[in-house]
Image: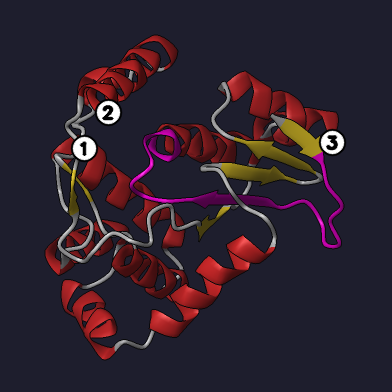
Amino acid sequence: MTQNVQTDAGFRVVVFADFVCPYSYLAVDQIDRLAREYDLKPLWRPHWLHPDTPLEGASRDNTPEAQAKRDRLKAWIREMAPEQYPRIRFPEKRQYSFRAFEAMEFAYDCGVDAEFKTALYDLMWTRGANIAEQDTLASAGERAGIEPIEMRQALASGEYVERALDAVNGARRIGITSTPTIFLGRTRINGWHYYEVLQSVLEQQGVQPKETLLS
């Protein structure tokens, strides 16, 4: 679903997402591709899907209805993103997201939030890592260029707790209810869409591919 929104500062790309959301994971490649092809710098912000999840995670509902829902999700991903489906490892339990949001804020201050985001999604959704664990966050940080000890110290200090909470509350205040929610300039896109849809939205607003601008 797309809709026009008003913006008060140049062309921006902002993605509200949660690392535990499979649709958000599927959007990573698309947004990273937009960044490369249109010379954009997307900003990823947190929308906390399951704030009731404890630090240790929560067991999945194994009722027939819940299993059927998961099966439909897997079938949908297999159809819509066949190139990504073979790599996906669905988590055995619902994971705690907030510590990852803290780490993301630290990565932003280090200037590598885009790289950190991609690395952490990859660790969770293709390597089976737990994003609530400092080892996982330190590993994602290292992939993005952050020394592991610096990531651990930032998380242990609690310095980014309030900022991450402000970001989560900010998403609620502006009415974010689905993940991903993508703002491309004046247009808000709710949920996952094909890359060509995002591309069309950009070009309708006058954004041209980088190679076109360089030619």
On whether residue 204 falls in the magenta region, the answer is no
Residue visible at 82% across and 45% down? 186
Q: Is residue 11 above or below residue 162?
A: above
Question: Mark 2 or 3 closer to N-term?
Answer: 2
Segment tinted magenta in the rendering: 4-25
| 187 or 49, nearer to the observer | 49
Residue 13 highlighted magenta (yes or no):
yes
Q: Residue furthest top?
A: 79
Q: Which residue carries the number 1 mark?
A: 61
Dot 2 alpha-carbon crowd within 10 angstroms: few under 14, some 14 to 19, many 20 or more: few
Say if mark 1 contacts mark 2, CB within 8 Å. Answer: yes
Classify mark 1: residues with Cα within 10 Å, few (<14), some (14-19) or many (20+): few
Alpha carbon of mark 2 to alpha carbon of mark 3: how far?
41 Å
Q: Secondary structure at mark 3?
A: loop
Residue 29, image quadrant: top left
Q: Judge from the rendering whether residue 215 lies leftward or rightward of residue 27; answer left or right.
A: right
Tell whether 42 sits left or right of 114: right
Residue 50 in percent (x, y) is at 38, 54
Q: Which mark is residue 134?
A: none
On the question of residue 117 being in view, the answer is yes
Is residue 133 shown above or below 65?
below
Q: Amino acid at mark 2?
A: Ala
Q: Earlier in the sequence, mark 1 or mark 3?
A: 1
Which residue is labeled 3 in the image? 205
Residue holding disc 2: 66
126 vs 52, nearest the viewer: 52
**To which quarter of the image does residue 1 belong?**
top right
Residue shown at 66% from the left, 29% from the top: 198
Q: Are marks 1 and 3 in contact (CB under 8 Å)?
A: no
* Identity of the residue drawn at 72% across and 42% down: 188
Identify residue type, mark 3.
Gln
Residue 215 visible at all: no
